[in-house]
Amino acid sequence: MGAPVVTAPVGMSDAALERFVRGHADWLADKLSRQTPARPFEDGAFVPVRGVEHRIDHHPGRRGTMWLDEDDGQPLLCVAGEEQYVARRVTDGLKRMARADLEASVVRHAAAVNRTVTSLKVKETRSQWGSCTNKGALSFSWRLIMAPPFVLDYVAAHEVAHLVEHNHSDRFWRLTEKLAPQTPEACRWLKQQGPHLFTIGTGG
């Protein structure tokens, strides 16, 4: 399935178009999730971790939760414990990884703009990859851990930039790109590939 295409009236500003898309993000995510086959977290399934496809490898006799490994060049996402808990342990493990990677990016970018982040949350979302409150609280989708690192870093930079510019002005985008030089590539990746991440770990 290709990326969704938005048709806008002649003369519609980019800002108005962005507001329209954001306002219909839940609807779009729902439609895409219905069209794209679900990819449940189960033994033998593939899941991207930091942009690299890993095969889920269940180890029922092992102790622990989740860890990354490799077998003859094939990246593995290993899960211990009973089969009925595989999906939950994969999700929990990816959430921990997402939080660690996002914290590292946020700390670096916040220091660069001399701003304080009051809290950082990683959660399930259906529309936004990240958000920033006027009190400095940042929230992110845990599914960013499935994207390439430069994409996750861009989203972190985007939200940190909102600590300085509470808008999407030209100044905001200049600051975001200064923090994350691959901003244009990351935006394209999210538009083209982002919706598919919401189908991973569902179904089954």
Image: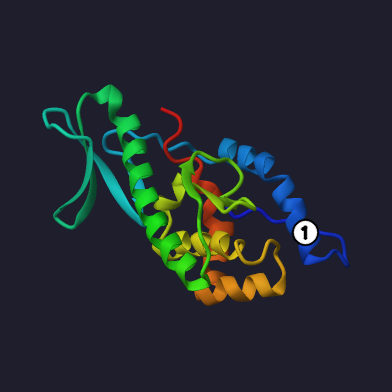
Judge from the rendering whether residue 166 lies leftward or rightward of residue 186; answer left or right: right
Q: Give left or right: position of 49 versus 121.
A: left
In the displayed structure, 5 sits above or below 157; it is above
Q: Residues within 10 Å of mark 1 (few under 14, many from 20)?
A: some
Residue found at the far left of this picture: 61
Residue at position x 35%, y 35% from top? 41
Task: Give the image quarter of residue 102.
Answer: bottom left
Q: Amino acid at mark 1?
A: Leu
Give SS at disc 1.
helix
User: Where 28 sits versus 61, above or below?
Assistant: below
Q: Quadrant of residue 111?
A: bottom left
Q: Could you say which is closer to the camera, residue 196 or residue 18?
A: 18
Residue under the point 59% across and 53% down: 132
Image coordinates for residue 20, horizontal then vertical, percent: 77, 52
**Count of marks, rendered view:** 1
On the image, numbered disc 1 is attached to which residue? 17
Q: Quadrant of the C terminus?
A: top left
Q: Is residue 127 positioned above or below 188 on the image? A: above
Residues 153 and 17: in front is 153
Q: Residue at x 40, y 51 (%)?
A: 145
Instruction: Give the left or right position of residue 50, taking residue 11 as reference.
Output: left
- The spot of residue 52 in percent (x, y) is 33, 57
- Can you give x and y, in whole percent of width and height, for residue 43 in the image? 27, 34
Task: Specify how the rendered protein is coloured.
Answer: rainbow
